[in-house]
Amino acid sequence: MAATRSPLIHVMTRAAERAGRAMLRDFGEVEQLQVSRKGPADFVSVADNRAERTLKTELAKARPRFGFILEEGGTERPAEGETRQWIVDPLDGTTNFLHGIGHFAISIALEQEGQILAGVIYNPVNDEMYWAEKGQGAYMNDRRLRVSGRQRLDQALIATGVPFLGHGDGDRFMAELGALMPHIAGIRRFGAASLDLAYVAAGRYDGFWERGLSSWDVAAGVLLVQEAGGFVTEIEGGRNPVFAGSLLASNSTLHTHLAKRLVAERPPPAASPSVPSEG
């Protein structure tokens, strides 16, 4: 039986699908632009902004009083007496898009006074629509999602993000990587935090950690993992992962094991500049 989507989820998925259709057309141009003298970077910036305009138009049309937190367009406060706002990343995985790699997503969340009420993450390349509403479970298209049931680190596949171009703390990341690598089955870095979290919700990854994140990177994904039965905190254990900038997500058992190793490890004294990484 198909999962029942509320009117709110219909609004969000319809906006994501409309933006996704245009994004796919733009993505089809990237391969040709790779060999041009100018290169695809400016084109991708145009595609990113076009997707954000489409999302904003569709969401505002359906819920005109809600505010916005937009990756490109900044913040717009809700109407007087309203406390709900959209948190939107029109293109998570920009570097993948830029290089013609079909692993990127549109992420939309609805937030109210610090709580995420609904979330949608859409990869238009493979038409996977991840969605969740608080208290109603998490889904990929019409399939109910559950986080992985693995209990042992040596069987766990963990995703992360790597500091790049001087952004983030490379020494700390290398220390955390060193603390985990001897104990887990594998580490993946695919370049889109929203999809990393969606994959944790779907049980494809057993966990995910990263620092230096923004709310639009993770707001929808945090709710997906929680509604799929997972556990999400800041890496040091704080309960504000959407806005705090660091995040650890897994099932409850692995979360405890991962947090213990990540928090116990401290970076060595800096001997050289931070290694580059990507977002």
Image (spheres, helix red, strand yellow):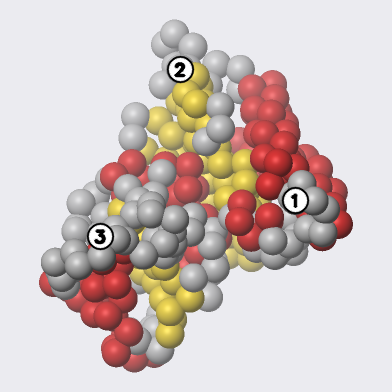
Which element type, helix, strand or loop, lies under badge 2? loop
* Residue topped by disc 1: 39
| Nearest to N terminus: mark 1 or mark 3 | 1
Query: Which residue is depicted at the point 69% across and 61% down?
Result: 99
Marks 1 and 3, how far apart at CA: 38 Å
Query: Which residue is depicted at the point 29% across and 61% down?
Result: 273
Left or right? Give the position of 138 relative to 10. Answer: left
* Residue topped by disc 2: 77
Q: Quadrant of residue 7?
A: top right
Left or right? Give the position of 33 relative to 278. Answer: right
In this view, the residue in front, 277 or 82, is 277
In this view, the residue in front, 240 or 228, is 240
The nearer-to-camera label among 1 and 2 is: 1
| Nearest to N terminus: mark 1 or mark 2 | 1
Amino acid marked by disc 3: Ile
The answer to the question of whether label 3 and label 2 lie on touching residues, with beta carbons closer than 8 A, is no
Picture coordinates of residue 156, whole percent (x, y): 39, 84
- Do we see residue 24 in this rendering? no
- Do we see residue 236 in this rendering? yes
* Residue topped by disc 3: 235
Picture coordinates of residue 263, whole percent (x, y): 17, 67
Residue closest to the far top: 80
| Nearest to N terminus: mark 3 or mark 2 | 2
